[in-house]
Image (cartoon, rainbow, N blue to C red):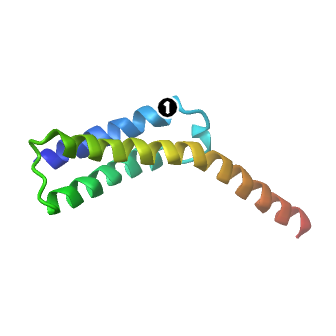
Amino acid sequence: MQILYAIAIGAVIGVIVRYTIPGRRSHGMALVPGAAAAATAAAWAILAWLGWDWSVGWIWVISLGAALAVALVLALVTPGARQRADAAFFDRAKRA
């Protein structure tokens, strides 16, 4: 049950990052929160599989830290990648 709380908190972290980092118009509304929630779930599942108990604080710190890291990387990298892809697309469209 605690994994659901962690996933929800990870999604909230993704929402906060999405609306605080500039460039959010260049990616979908659910990309950053969804990826943050997925990173939280994956980290939690791996740590639980390794035998970590949910009552230990480190599983929370690592899982939510994974959410923050993934959200920040996506929010910072996606706008530049999207601009380059759009520029390449429009360049090809001009030549056709």
Residue at the spot of label 1: 19
Residue visible at 17% across and 39% down?
Answer: 57
The quadrant where residue 68 appears: top left
Give the residue type that dot 1 points to: Tyr
Q: Is residue 28 left or right of residue 10?
A: right
Question: Which percent across, then down, holds residue 47?
Answer: 20, 56
Question: Which percent across, then down, holds residue 48?
Answer: 15, 57
Q: Residue furthest right?
A: 95
* Quadrant of the rendering where the C terminus is positioned: bottom right
Residue visible at 28% across and 47% down?
Answer: 63
Q: Can residue 26 be spotted in the picture?
A: yes
**In the image, is residue 12 above or below residue 44?**
above
In front of the other: 18 or 68:
68
Q: Is residue 16 left or right of residue 7?
A: right
In front of the other: 75 or 65:
65
**In the image, is residue 1 above or below residue 93?**
above
Question: Which percent across, then down, holds residue 34?
Answer: 38, 49
The quadrant where residue 22 appears: top right
> Dot 1 surroundings within 10 Å: few (below 14), some, or many (20 or more)?
few
Q: Is residue 38 left or right of residue 92?
A: left
Residue visible at 78% across and 60% down?
Answer: 88
Question: Which percent across, then down, holds residue 42?
Answer: 28, 58
Q: Can residue 28 be spotted in the picture?
A: no
**In the image, is residue 23 above or below residue 73?**
above
Q: Residue furthest top?
A: 20
Residue visible at 16% across and 61% down?
Answer: 50
